[in-house]
Image (cartoon, helix red, strand yellow):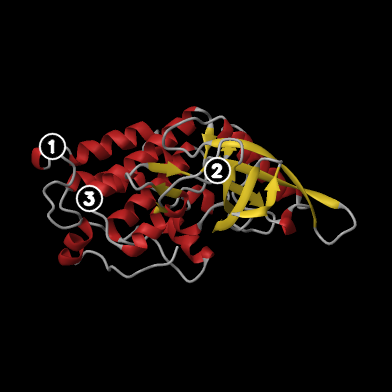
Amino acid sequence: MNADRVIDGRYEVGDVIGRGASAHVHRGRDLRSGRSVAIKVLRKDLVRDPVFHSRFEREATTVAGLSHPAIVSILDTGHEEVGDGSPDKVRVPFIVMEYVEGRSLRDLLRTRRLTLDETIRYQAGILSALGFSHRAGVVHRDIKPANVMITPAGAVKVVDFGISRATGHPAATLTHAQVFVGTPSYLSPEQARGETADARSDLYSAGCVLYELLTGRPPFVGENPLSIAYQHIHKQPARVGTVLPALDAVLAKALAKEREDRFQDAHSFEEALLSAVKDTKNGAPGSTFATDVHWALALAGHIGMADVGC
């Protein structure tokens, strides 16, 4: 820890453990409790930008109201006064969150293949978190493997509600500079068209995550964000073809182009997912697979296993 930097007279700021487009996340320590925490701080060069400042503070407000085992908890919020090279100091907002031991699903996918049991368990955790946030009126809008933490015990923690919005609150999915709000590889067709996202948009993104968990790659890749967005709107992904037809049907419904054709809520998605694998040996998801599903798919020749950057 860097004992020279303590914010709000309470939080000792340590090394950077995560970097995003608009904020850095530090490992920290609560000096009052001795508890390890994660401290998310808006980048100093964006502090004077009202859009990023508002988005950051909205995340703090949004997630503070979400108490669920699969959603990272907000512990505190505040501002730190720092100099930015100008005569006046600026107030940099920060969010103190629970520190999650483990690694992101993105990093996990880059190091090894997942078993079908892990795939179903992680996907169910994501859907449980989304179901809770949707019932609370919050749409995440950026569900992807990088925003899902997996603890050493295998528990799921959904993070980064930085571009979330309250249901019913109009919010464009394209910025004034025509930059997508969200990550192209996991963007719903309506987000790609610049329309307002809703809960079913999150479920499409969750379908993209499921596709990647099963195949090792997202459903669409391209040379640039626009080419990927075009595919989400107009193309069908390569067929996965698992040995469980019911699972293929779940994936197809999750990735339907029209919202009305998808699962209408996270609970329905989760129920269908668990039902699709319930008839495997001894009723345990994936228990008939001695090897992971990626290997089975590769043998079947349905889809390439090329590594793809997120």
| Res. 219 mark | none
Looking at the picture, which amino acid does disc 1 mark?
Answer: Gly
- Alpha-carbon distance for marks 1 and 2? 35 Å
On the image, numbered disc 2 is attached to which residue?
161
- Circle 1/circle 2 CB separation < 8 Å: no
From the viewer's perspective, is residue 30 above or below residue 219?
A: above
Mark pair 3, 1: CA separation: 13 Å
Provide the residue designation for mark 1: 283
Question: Which mark sits nearer the N-terminus, 1 or 2?
Answer: 2
Q: Amino acid at mark 3?
A: Leu
- Residue 129 picture location, percent across and down: 42, 36
Give the Cα separation between the discs numbered 2 and 3. 27 Å
Kind of residue at disc 2: Phe
Q: Residues within 10 Å of mark 3 (few under 14, many from 20)?
A: many
| Mark 1 neighbour class, 10 Å CA radius: few under 14, some 14 to 19, many 20 or more | few
**Local SS, label 3:** helix
Q: Which residue is mark 3?
A: 116
Decide if residue 47 is on the left or right side of residue 77: right
- Residue drawn 59% across and 38% down? 165
Which of the two labelled residues, at mark 2 and mark 3, occupies the earlier sequence position?
A: 3
Q: Residue at x 61, y 36 (%)?
A: 32
